[in-house]
Image: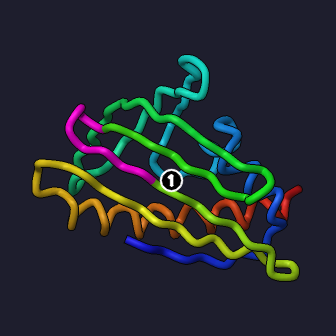
Amino acid sequence: MNLSFRIKSDIDLVFDYLTDMEKFVSVHPVISRIDRVQNGKYLVYETLKLGFIPFSFTYLVTIEKSQFDKTVIIRATVFKVTNIEMKFVLKADGDYTRIDEEIQFRSPLPVVFMMQRVFKKQHSQLFKNMEQMSYQV
């Protein structure tokens, strides 16, 4: 799945929000906490709503980043069976930053369609929140 966003924010600020987990959690719509576990690994606490019922869970993520290329790769394994890889490629566009995102889901469960809908909504809100934070900096 490929997504693209264009937000009025400095590319370095966007890169910082995607790679600094304290900043990332402050703008993410469903992640409530992130703890550093070890080198490049983090434990993520997330709550989704299934209808009106909140469903909380945790999972490990790893982060790779290239300051030179302005790319960030986040990998996660949720419930030990669903692997997710998100690659963010940032490009400066005047006062804006373009974020091209490639998301890959691998799971033996039939969850990919549902996850695509959830990620589209979450990441749209994530980058709106990030854009709003850039006005406060």
Residue 133 lies left or right of residue 63; in this view the side is right
The 10 Å Cα crowd at callout 1, few under 14, some 14 to 19, many 20 or more, is some
Q: Position of residue 65 (x, y in %)?
A: 67, 46
Foreground pick, 21 / 39: 39
Q: Position of residue 30 (x, y in %)?
A: 45, 48
Q: Position of residue 55 (x, y in %)?
A: 27, 40
Type of secondary structure dominating the magenta stretch: strand
- Whether 97 is among the magenta residues is no
Q: Residue at x 83, y 57 (%)?
A: 12
Residue 98 lies left or right of residue 134; in this view the side is left
Give the magenta range.
78-85
Q: Residue at x 33, y 62 (%)?
A: 118
Q: Quadrant of residue 132?
A: bottom right
Quadrant location of the C terminus?
A: bottom right
Quadrant location of the N terminus?
A: bottom left
Q: Residue at x 28, y 60 (%)?
A: 115
Can you say whether 52 is above or below 97 in the image?
above
